[in-house]
């Protein structure tokens, strides 16, 4: 018999999902894994890591840990790390921890630096005893 560990189970690796050039999706897309987008998505995307190829297009909000854009995005992008390659075309705001833009990339919008959450401050004044 096989014994199971009481500790948290090991997470099974998640394969990268490919949305090919000839695929078009309407609706929101969510994934805990990586997504390579060469097709078109009309809707919001929430993924771990998003790579948008030169033929890839998103019309909607993008949320991820990391986003690499070679294609077109019309909507907001929120990620810790965002890289716009020379072929990128982004129309919308980018909220980021780190932003890299190659010469030739098109970006029309605001760049907003994500700030890490501030831990609650502890009170130095002792509370009055009741």
Image (cartoon, rainbow, N blue to C red):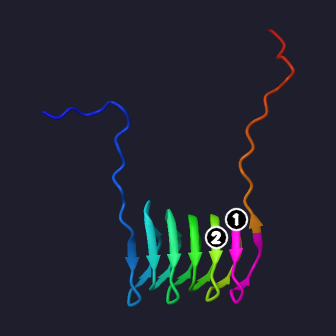
Write the start and end of the magenta stretch as one range: 99-111
- The reply to whether dot 2 and dot 1 touch (C-beta < 8 Å) is yes
Q: Quadrant of residue 2?
A: top left
Residue 98 tag number: 1
Residue at 46% x, 79% y is 37
Badge 1 crowding class, 10 Å Cα cut-off, few under 14, some 14 to 19, many 20 or more, is: some
Percent across and percent down for residue 36 are 45, 76
Q: Position of residue 43 (x, y in %)?
A: 51, 77
Q: Is residue 8 magenta?
A: no
Q: Residue 18 at what x, y percent from top left?
A: 39, 76
Please tell me which residue is depicted at 68% across the width and 84% down the height of the picture: 91
Mark 2–mark 1 Cα distance, whole angstroms, equals: 6 Å
Question: Looking at the picture, does residue 53 appear above or below residue 46?
Answer: below
Q: Which mark is residue 82?
A: 2
Q: Residue at x 81, y 9 (%)?
A: 129
Q: Quadrant of the N terminus?
A: top left
């Amino acid at each position: 018999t096989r014994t199971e560990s009481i500790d948290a189970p090991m997470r099974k690796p998640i394969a990268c999902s490919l949305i090919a050039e000839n695929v078009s999706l309407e609706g929101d897309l969510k994934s805990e894994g990586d997504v390579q987008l060469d097709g078109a998505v009309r809707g919001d995307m929430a993924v771990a890591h998003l790579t948008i190829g030169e033929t890839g297009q998103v019309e909607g909000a993008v949320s991820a840990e990391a986003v690499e854009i070679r294609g077109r995005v019309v909507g907001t992008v929120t990620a810790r790390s965002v890289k716009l390659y020379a072929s990128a075309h982004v129309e919308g705001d980018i909220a980021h921890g780190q932003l890299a833009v190659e010469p030739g990339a098109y970006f029309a919008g605001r760049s907003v630096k994500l700030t890490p959450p501030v831990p609650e401050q502890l009170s130095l004044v002792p509370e009055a005893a009741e």
